[in-house]
Amino acid sequence: MRLTYLHDFEETVLSGLTLSEALDKIEGFHGSVAPGILIGGLMIDLAQELVGDSILYNAVVETPYCLPDAVQIFTPCTMGNNWLKVVDYGRFAVTLYNKDSGKGIRVWVDLNKLEGFRDVFNWFLKRAPKKELPLDVLLPAILHAGREMLSYRNVRVFDQAWGVKKGAVGVCPACGESYPVNHGTVCRACAEGPYYCASEEQEPLQ
């Protein structure tokens, strides 16, 4: 076991990975062993078990923090292949659903259950400084809580809207760049304003 304080959990398996393998993948993808991604791994492992191996699924997460990385680490769904969508409700929840039928499983951290795991509860709701909950305390606490802090329910994703293909590509008459023509007569950057402004500075980025 890569971290001696997790020795008691070395038999843990997440999405077919040993705990050590899972932690290595988390660190390699995210840059650190983030507690939120470990929780996400537990959530995804449960959802995968409930959805079943034969289902080709998409994923939706309800927060831009940690869960998108967890999905990309533990499932084939990525932002790049368009099988993962982020809907920013600010809730720590993930849904895996059948691409064809829209039927799926939504898993979330249940705060009523989480109250029974005080260290994780305080970290999750930011009620304790990080220095009071270092990884050697928090990670074992998360693994101890395991699925007992989670709830799930069957859901149906409306119209499988996020499975729509890009469709035709055109050239924006305003900026001259390519864009999906179903966005309108011009690209969204030209219609709504871009996220950047042009800079004449040629100095290296600092």
Image: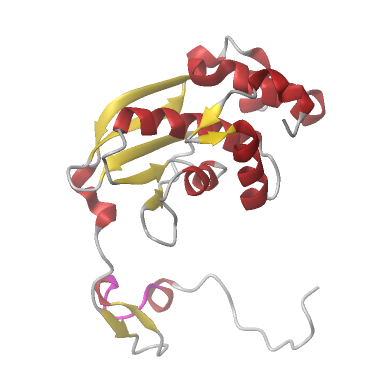
Relative to 189, say whether 27 is above or below: above
- Residue 160 picture location, percent across and down: 22, 49
Q: How many marks?
A: 0
In percent of the image, x 47 and y 44: which residue is there? 71
- Residue 15 picture location, percent across and down: 47, 35
The part of the image, by quadrant, that contains residue 53 is: top left
Q: Is residue 49 visible?
A: yes
Q: Is residue 129 visible?
A: no
Q: Main secondary structure of the magenta part?
A: loop
Q: Is residue 73 magenta?
A: no
- Residue 141 picture location, percent across and down: 66, 19
Among all residues in the image, which is located at the extreme top? 116
Please state if 52 lies on the left or on the right of 27 as rendered. left
Which sits in the foreground, 105 or 12?
Answer: 12
Q: Is residue 185 magenta?
A: yes
In percent of the image, x 43 and y 75: which residue is there? 189
Q: Quadrant of the N terminus?
A: top right
Q: Which residues are magenta?
A: 183-188
Q: Quadrant of the C terminus?
A: bottom right
In percent of the image, x 68 and y 17: which residue is there? 8
The part of the image, by quadrant, that contains residue 54 is: top left
In percent of the image, x 79 and y 85: which residue is there? 203
Relative to 151, say whether 179 is above or below: below
- Residue 44 picture location, percent across and down: 45, 34
Which colour assignment does the render follow? Answer: secondary structure
The part of the image, by quadrant, that contains residue 129 is: top right
Relative to 28, say whether 192 is above or below: below
